[in-house]
Amino acid sequence: MEDTRLLPPLLLIALFLLPASLLCAQNNSSQSGYHIDYSGNEPRFVQRLEWDADEYALHYELEIQVLKNAYETYRIDTAKENFIELSLPPGQYRFNVTTYDLLARRTETSDWMTFTVIAAFQPRIERVAPEAFFMDQKHERILHIAGAHILNDSVIYLKNEEHHIFPLQVINAGDSRVRLIFDDEKLIAGNYNIVIENPGGLNFSYSGFIIGYKKPMDVFMRMALVPAIPIYGEIFDFFGPNIFLLCSTFGFEAISSKRSSFNGGLEVSFTTYMINNVLIPRFNLDEIVMSFTNAETGAFFLDADVNLSFQKRFHNMRSALTFRAGGGLTLFGGYGELEKVDFIVHLNTNVTAIIQLFDIFYLDVGVDCSFYFSDIPFGLIKPRIGFVWQF
């Protein structure tokens, strides 16, 4: 969408190179020595020349000369105040001021004072691509703009009521196209205007650019090996602090995509365990043979968990650290000396790190702890290694 107040493509401004005795007027173009008059059908640049006042002056006479091959008189004006406002075409000028006293007698004439009127161009935006930056997508933050009178000196930025976001780099391609490269870490969600400010105060505002999120939640699917190590209870007493490799987990996790210090979410996971002496890694033949004599005792069980998740993200989601805590229900099946089939309650906590491998695929490493409550309570610690897919 475009600014509703369109200006002609070429207007004039005054940039003054004057001695200290010439005061610069304050107006709606700061202290630039000009202002824009919008009272007519078309905006008009009005230059203001100002000089030191003489308390005994009846009026002042200004001679304005323009530089062509040499300076020649362009116009002569009379002013009762110590300034004059006029509209001049582009060019190199100079002027002097002659004071007339209260008796209308010509007194002193000032030195020549030079100034330049340069062309000012009204910028315009016709198209932008993309029309939004989605912060939950891992893309380069490059904004392409096509329009008119986009100059090397143009200042271009994103603006809303609360924020101004300036690009890291501006790459011009002529006066009709430009690329803006933004720092992803400095993006702030909101609706923005794309503002172009040209030298001389002419500007253009293109509304409707969005910085936001394409989806409210990031969804992750994970599969991992979670070798179990008993840490207390009857299972620990029977098997000791050995590692059981045939344990795996599968789950889904939804975490807020909004950028913040920590992102909250929820995980649902299922974990299977097989614990038996035969499954303990051994490197001694006698120990391997002995393990089969104790193979009649073991357990197979399945955990179903619901966990609260708190995730800290780094480097535009190239890596993340996630803390989880929750609990669930376990279907426990023991045999031999552990013979028991029952549903038991457990609590768990874990911390995992994901590291981007390629696009939406991540390596998942971490450690889990689970605490089981039954007539044979026990606990497990579980190193984790696996893969994560982000949707």
Image (cartoon, helix red, strand yellow):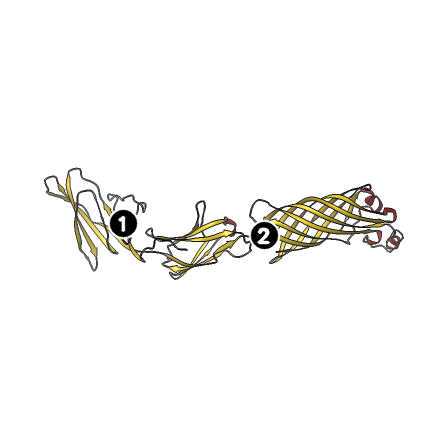
Query: Mark 1 or mark 2, which has the lower sequence index?
Result: 1
Q: Residue at x 27, y 49 (%)?
A: 39
Which label lies toward us, 1 or 2?
1
Q: Is residue 43 left or right of residue 207?
A: left
Quarter in which the C terminus is drawn? bottom right
Amino acid type, label 1: Ser
Q: Residue at x 60, y 52 (%)?
A: 218
Task: Report the residue that reaches farthest toward the top.
Answer: 55
Q: Residues within 10 Å of mark 2 (few under 14, many from 20)?
A: some
Q: Which mark is residue 276?
A: none
SS assignment at label 2: loop
Residue matched to label 2? 317
The location of residue 136, given as percent across then percent down, is: 56, 53
Residue matched to label 1? 39
Q: Please state which of residues 68 and 173 is positioned toward the viewer in this rendering.
A: 173
SS assignment at label 1: loop
The location of residue 168, given as percent across then percent down, is: 46, 53
Q: Please state which of residues 110 and 210 is positioned toward the viewer in this rendering.
A: 210
Q: Is residue 60 left or right of residue 129?
A: left
